[in-house]
């Protein structure tokens, strides 16, 4: 199957720690298309996210994030969005025209994965993660074309299931 026949961009959304980057990289490799992580692009162009939050505040970060999302969605790629990118109304409208994969995870599973020092919104622990996820979950679910839980299955298997689904072979 050629990239032109795939539902691209294929956008991964979900809470922090759900595996969007790790799974997205594997899905892109399986589909033989580029992978874009909007948070990584922001870091490459503007510095660490924790520093952007500390020095310029969350609104400034969200502006940078919106620009990174616009650029990424213009490319035929697998795209991983930061957990809060979907809060932007313009991003929500853009995602309506995309294939959106929601990655979910339980609070118990995420506690073992998250390094809170690199997550400015989680500096007070996973209780805050649960509050943020509960707040964003209706938006995630509304935007999703399909959903995959990443709590217990190996990420390689999840990535392969997503790639098979994208190819129409699942």
Image (cartoon, rainbow, N blue to C red):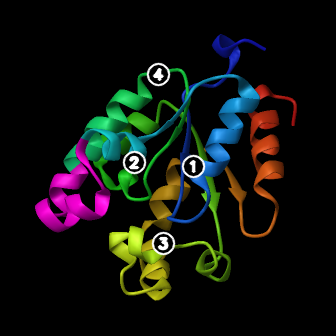
* Lower position in the chain sequence, tag 3 or tag 1: 1
Q: Quadrant of the N terminus?
A: top right
Number of numbered discs present?
4
Task: Give yes or no for contact between labels 4 and 1 (Cβ–Cβ under 8 Å).
Answer: no
Q: Secondary structure at mark 1?
A: helix
**Residue at the extreme left of the image, as rendered:** 56
Residue occupying the point 22% across, 54% down: 61
Magenta span contains residue 40 = no
User: Residue 121's spot in the image, x, y percent?
Assistant: 34, 73
Q: Residues within 10 Å of mark 3 (few under 14, many from 20)?
A: many
In the image, taking residue 66 as reference, residue 84 lies left or right, namely right
Viewer-nearest residue: 47 or 139: 47
* Lower position in the chain sequence, tag 2 or tag 4: 2
Please give the label number shown on residue 39. 2
Q: Secondary structure at mark 2?
A: helix
Residue occupying the point 63% across, 40% down: 25
Over which residues does the magenta segment extend? 46-62
Q: Which residue is mark 1?
A: 21
**Residue at the extreme right of the image, as rendered:** 169
Disc 3 versus disc 4: nearer the observer: 4
Whole-angstrom CA distance, mark 2 to mark 4, is 16 Å
Magenta span contains residue 52 = yes
Q: Which residue is mark 3?
A: 133
Q: Residues within 10 Å of mark 2 (few under 14, many from 20)?
A: many
Whole-angstrom CA distance, mark 1 to mark 2, is 9 Å
Q: Which residue is mark 4?
A: 75
Viewer-nearest residue: 16 or 100: 16
Disc 3 versus disc 2: nearer the observer: 2
Whole-angstrom CA distance, mark 3 to mark 2, is 18 Å
Task: Give yes or no for contact between labels 1 and 2 (Cβ–Cβ under 8 Å).
Answer: yes
* Lower position in the chain sequence, tag 3 or tag 2: 2
């Amino acid at each position: 199957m050629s990239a032109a026949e795939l539902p691209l961009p294929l956008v991964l959304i979900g809470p922090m720690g759900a595996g969007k980057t790790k799974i997205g990289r594997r899905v892109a490799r399986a589909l033989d298309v580029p992978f874009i992580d909007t948070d990584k692009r922001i870091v490459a162009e503007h510095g660490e996210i924790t520093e952007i939050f500390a020095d310029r505040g969350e609104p400034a970060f969200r502006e940078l994030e919106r620009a990174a999302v616009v650029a990424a969605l213009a490319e035929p790629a697998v795209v991983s969005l930061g957990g809060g990118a979907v809060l932007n109304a313009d991003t929500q409208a853009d995602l309506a025209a995309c294939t959106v994969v929601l990655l979910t995870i339980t609070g118990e599973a995420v506690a073992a994965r998250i390094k809170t020092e690199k997550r400015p919104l989680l500096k007070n622990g996973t209780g805050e993660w649960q509050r943020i996820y509960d707040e964003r979950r209706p938006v995630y679910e509304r935007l999703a074309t399909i959903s995959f839980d990443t709590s217990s299955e190996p990420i390689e298997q999840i990535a392969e299931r997503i790639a098979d689904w994208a190819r129409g072979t699942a």
